[in-house]
């Protein structure tokens, strides 16, 4: 009797100990090791980027590869090539349709840019003149006048730095195109081999593991594979939804270049915390500054609508995609944000998935 109870306690204690040690390890890595390995970590991430991309793509196309291999009896190597071709063709067609519209609007924007900058400069000049006239007619304490002048100069300096950094960023992107092309080629080749030789890679990894760890590692690996592909699909859906909502909203507001701006806002949804506000909030503030209050308010309403919709559906979409309950997903996002900032939004759900896989492996958490 005592032995049976001991085994039951041990069965519970072992996975709990693993989870505690894993969380402790993550904490130590995040707060004591990573800060001292910044440059080394950056170099390692840069060196392994093509292979990380390849692993993600291999996981995403794996269901299609398995279907072609098992259902249609196609050799795995050929099935991988067909899956890559279908995926790349679909993405290319979608990008072509989007870029064709973007190109039209970008050409028009380049033509309107001189007029836009002239109008913006005139608006700024009128604003500064009104502020100066107001100060002249309503004398302020010397300290306040100096503070206002310093803030105006700071805004101008910030705008100058923003323009300089934007130009440098564009130059950097152009200069990195050869490296980007190389990364794409290496990622494509690595994807083929990762997907084609998946079983051999798994067998090699399992051959160097102790037998007792094979089942837990296999369960965690399968869970993470499903969660990763689900996470990518969920984020793609959420980003697309944000872009579509913004495009429709801007069209309703009769905004010129609504499609291009909406796409940019959708892409900004990738950014944690800031998200669509990266573009919409400064844009709204600018219109408040120049006196266009109705349009500024409309932009804020659009921003609020997009954010509220995302906050409502994100836990459900992410939870169903990565295998977590919406409440657990919400907890993971909040805890990760508090512990590790923006990066924690990605780290914490992965930790929750791993913990869930460990608990299921040892029978503490039952499969649905």
Image (tube, rainbow, N blue to C red):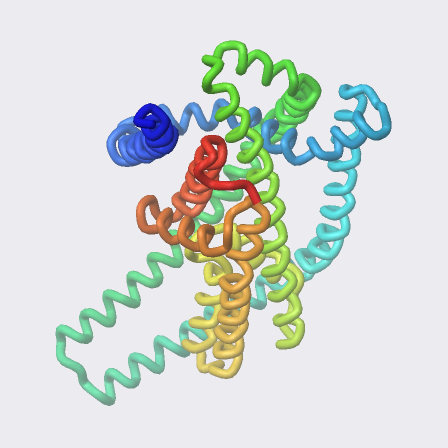
Q: Residue furthest bottom?
A: 137
| Residue depicted at 62% across the width and 22% down the height | 186
In the picture, which quadrant includes the N terminus?
top left
- Foreground: 235 or 107? 235
Q: Residue furthest front?
A: 1
For residue 257, above or below residue 341: below
- Residue 142 relative to residue 4: left or right: left
Provide residue 362's location: percent of width, then percent of height.
45, 31
In the picture, which quadrant includes the C terminus?
top right
For residue 165, above or below residue 79: below
Provide residue 128's location: percent of width, then percent of height.
35, 75
| Residue depicted at 37% across the width and 31% down the height | 8
Provide residue 159's location: percent of width, then percent of height.
39, 58
- Residue 312 relative to residue 106: left or right: left
Provide residue 188's location: percent of width, then percent of height.
67, 26
- Foreground: 161 or 339? 339
């Amino acid at each position: 009797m005592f032995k049976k109870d001991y085994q039951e306690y041990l069965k519970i204690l072992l996975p709990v100990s693993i989870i505690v040690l894993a969380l402790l390890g993550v904490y130590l890595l995040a707060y004591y090791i990573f800060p001292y390995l910044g440059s080394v970590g950056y170099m390692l991430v840069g060196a392994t980027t093509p292979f990380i991309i390849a692993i993600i793509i291999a996981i995403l196309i794996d269901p299609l590869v398995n279907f072609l291999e098992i259902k249609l009896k196609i050799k795995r190597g050929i099935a991988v090539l067909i899956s890559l071709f279908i995926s790349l063709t679909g993405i290319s067609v979608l990008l072509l349709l989007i870029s064709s519209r973007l190109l039209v609007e970008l050409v028009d924007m380049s033509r309107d840019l001189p007029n836009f900058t002239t109008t913006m400069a005139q608006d700024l000049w009128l604003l500064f003149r009104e502020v100066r006239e107001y100060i002249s007619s309503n004398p302020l304490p010397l300290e306040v006048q100096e503070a206002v002048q310093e803030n105006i100069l700071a805004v101008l300096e910030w705008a100058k730095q923003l323009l300089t950094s934007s130009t440098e960023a564009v130059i950097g992107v152009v200069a990195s195109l050869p490296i980007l092309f190389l990364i794409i080629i290496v990622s494509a080749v690595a994807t083929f081999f990762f997907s084609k030789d998946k079983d051999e890679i798994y067998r090699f990894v399992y051959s160097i593991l102790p037998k007792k760890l094979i089942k837990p590692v296999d369960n965690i690996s399968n869970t993470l594979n499903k969660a990763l592909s689900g996470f990518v699909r969920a984020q793609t859906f959420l980003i697309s939804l944000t872009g579509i909502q913004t495009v429709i909203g801007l069209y309703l507001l009769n905004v010129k270049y609504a499609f291009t701006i909406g796409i940019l806002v959708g892409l900004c949804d990738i950014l944690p915390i800031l998200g669509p506000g990266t573009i919409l909030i400064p844009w709204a503030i600018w219109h408040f500054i120049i006196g266009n209050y109705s349009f500024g308010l409309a932009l804020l309403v659009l921003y609020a609508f997009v954010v509220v919709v995302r906050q409502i559906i994100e836990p459900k979409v992410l939870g169903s995609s990565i295998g977590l309950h919406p409440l657990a997903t919400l907890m993971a996002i909040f805890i990760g944000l508090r512990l590790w900032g923006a990066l924690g939004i990605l780290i914490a759900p992965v930790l929750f998935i791993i913990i869930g896989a460990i608990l299921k492996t040892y029978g503490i958490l039952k499969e649905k």
